[in-house]
Image (cartoon, rainbow, N blue to C red):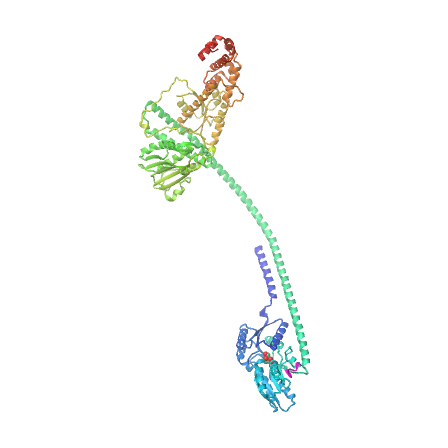
Amino acid sequence: MNIGVVFNKCFYWILGFVLMLFSCNNNNSSDKINIGFAQAMTNDDWRRSMNDAMQLQTSLIPEVNLVIYDANYEVERQINQIERFIADSLDIIIVSPILSKPITPIVQKALDANIPVLVVDRKTENETYTAYLGADNKEVGNKAANRIIASMTTDTIRVVEITGLEGSSPAEERSYGFKKVLDGHKNIKIIKTIRGNWESESIEENFKNFLKNGVGVDYVFAHNDRMARGAWQVARDLGLENTIQIIGVDGLNTPSGGIRMVKDGVLDATILYPTGGEEAIKLAVEIVKNKSVVKNNILTTTVIDKFNANIMQDQYDKIQEQRAQIANQIKAIGQQEEKYYAQNNLLLVTMGLLAIILSLALYSIYSMFTIRKKNRQLELTANKVIVQRSQIEKIAQEVKESNEAKFNLFTGLSHEFKTPITLILSSIESILDTAKNKGFGIMNEVELIYNNSNRLLRLVNQLLDFRKLDDRKFTLRASKTNIYTFTKAIHKDFASEAKKRNIKFKVECNDENLDVYIDRNLMDKVYFNLLSNAFKFTPDNGEITISIYNTIEKNMVNIRFSDTGIGIPKDEIDNVFQPFFKGSNNKKKSSGIGLHISKELVELHKGHIEVRSVQGSIFNISLLKGRDHFNDNEVIIEDDMVDNLGLDFGPDYFDNQTHLLEDVDTNKERYSILIIEDNTDLSMFLKSKLQIEYKIYLSNGTDSTERAFEVIPDVIICDLDLPYKNGFEVCSILKSDWRTSHIPTIILTALGNKESFVEGMKSGADLFLTKPFSYSVLMQSIQSLLYNREKLRYYYTNSIYKLDHSGCSNNMEQEFLDKLNYTIKNNLENADFNVEQLAVDLGISRMQLYRKVKAILDLNISDYINNFRLENSKQLLEKTNLTVAEIAYKSGFSSPNYFSTVFKKKYGDSPNSIR
Ligand code: FRU
């Protein structure tokens, strides 16, 4: 059995035991002798003394329980009270009947219920009781009569008898006994019988009236002392108290009792009528205990007169004193008992608590061991869990790594796909160019290849975007954009399909000048997704509308894409933006990530996209106007939208045969471009395209920097992902070298993330093109870089002679020019100082010097030195008094004549005329 259960059982056992002990100390009424006493009344001292005696005796017998009911002279009430005792199944009933007759049946009932009945003082009829206890009332009557006889002094004695309540046995018997004795005495006459009810008031009136008649009375026998006193009072009132002798009954030792009255001369005598209270309890106990008892138990009576009144009083006083002592002792014992029980109970409670504490202590010890055991088990389980968790973590890590590897492979492959797709797209552009040049029409297949390559590219991009969103790698680069122009540009891309399928495709706008900050690249993806969807699900002859609303009051712009397509089922509409969602009515192939990406990209703009579908679908994009909702690093400055940089296979393109090639001026001096690219296809493609306009040098990446130093090109196009040095490394080497620092560099990359962009910028790259790039964009980029270089060159050229060597140049070009100028300046007077000497001083080759100076100043280096000399001489002519010849030598010209010739050639005037 489980030890915990055992402990629990022990605990309850102890508790039960303690309760049992308690219960032993409680007086259990069922083990006692229950006595019920139906008292007739308690308004007189005799009855009170009877009750006191019973209670005193009861207190001496611990097993007796006494209940006293008082009927207060009401017979009906007494019957009911006895009835109640019967119902309570008491062990015995003691009855002192008010009247004999009416009480007899209820006593019989008790007897029938096997409840013994002890009748006291007054009797029931026909000896209906188990036992009777009381004095012999006939004897009482005899004794009263004998007293009168004994006191005879006159011939005739006139007696008045005052009886008790008619129908009560003492009254009947006392009268009977009295008369019986007096019957033999002719000269003792009962001249009047007054019927009383045991109380004095019941006889006073009658007795008074009788005395007032003048009849002489010698003796009065009253059936009790109370009526005897009443008679005496009447006699006294009439001044007859000394002529009338009065005998009473009861003989109580109380202040107004019979003994007192005898002593005071009020009564001649009183017949002692004992209450028998004490004896009644003793007898009742014996009856209950089934001891054999006498049926009629007669108490002794005696006559108390002036001769024995004192003795009787003394004896009664002593008895009362003893009773009082006994009562006190009983009370003290009771208190002791209570104390004992209280202490005993306290002890038991303490013991009980001790037992509980002990068992709890034992239980705690047991629990401690159990807990320790369980802890050990838990530790073991925890260790197991840790091991399992680490295994799971390991597996999860492996799964993660494997997933990562797969993702990387997938991402890598997607990147890889981009280069061939770019090539395909660029090749088509090339085919198109060639066709245009030769005036050929374009085959439908070419359009097909172009469109599908674009589609393929978009899908690859979508996959990469999904990964990027997953990695939270998108960085917003919002620029101020005319949203109408932006929308129209994309509209153009879908115009051809709309025309072919007779779809009414239009752009509506309530404000064509509305500018919004958007990341054009990202918003382009959103537009493409929404429009691709619309075109996918709109049947031929349907309608697709892009509506742009400038909502001025809300500072918002709403862009709505509505179509008349199949729509989205109502119960699926909440899920359309979930990744991999596919509508149940969508039977076409779809990745299910386009709308998800669109939502993420719109939210990246702090915008909101929602969808409704009633007939067809409506996608609504809400964007905030202004730029306050973006961080500073999320906003860039971009040129205004150039309308359609890419190839336009618009609706009329293939019908139009007038695209003619502009003549290439092969004689003009061409800029040179170094292409550093390890993908031969791409570098060959770029070469084939660019060589029309530029002089092309190639490097496969193995000799990138060497080639750059060697050729000093005007522009460098460098792939990022190169086998030896990557694009960033190549760029930073070239940008930190005087020889090449001025060369605009374009980095080509498949990575479109912010980090790459920042790294590219750090390395000094001038432009960063993400694959796949449009050839046109590349061309434009090259041109704008060369244009910028031109602007810089203009600046340098115009401020060249103002340039001062300050030693705190802030870029490589400035530094180079400072050094150049400083070297030339230092050698101004040296007529032998030439280009070779300058190149040696600068630590670069003559050729490199030549190209560098040409690139940044668009000047021949010899001309530059000459210009320097001439500018110096001009200043000397203007500011000094030196002779022309002196100035010629000071400016490094070997002869004054030669100086004059070149001076005039440059400034139009001879040195002399300036002077
Ligand atoms: C008390 C009493 C006594 C008398 C007895 C008779 O109530 O009246 O005075 O002796 O009853 O039953």
**Residue 514, horizontal then vertical, whole percent:** 39, 33
Q: Look at the image and tell me in which quarter the N terminus lies.
A: bottom right
Identify the residue at image location x=53%, y=22%.
Answer: 808
Identify the residue at image location x=58%, y=69%.
Answer: 29
**Residue 158, horizontal then vertical, whole percent:** 61, 88
Give 500 or 490, whichever is nearer the viewer: 490
Q: Is residue 664 above or below residue 759?
A: above
Quadrant of picture, ligand 1: bottom right
Q: Is residue 190 above or below residue 400?
A: below
Observer able to see residue 423: yes
Residue 42 in which image quadrant: bottom right
**Residue 237, horizontal then vertical, whole percent:** 61, 82
Residue 279 in which image quadrant: bottom right
| Residue 180 within the segment the image draws in magenta | no
Residue 14 in which image quadrant: bottom right
Give 370 or 347, whichever is nearer the viewer: 347
| Residue 269 within the segment the image draws in magenta | yes
Total tally of numbered discs in the picture:
0
Q: Is residue 734 above or below residue 881?
A: below
Q: Is residue 808 left or right of residue 599?
A: right
The magenta stretch is 264-270
Observer able to see residue 840: no
**Residue 546, horizontal then vertical, whole percent:** 36, 36
Q: Is residue 910 left or right of residue 306?
A: left
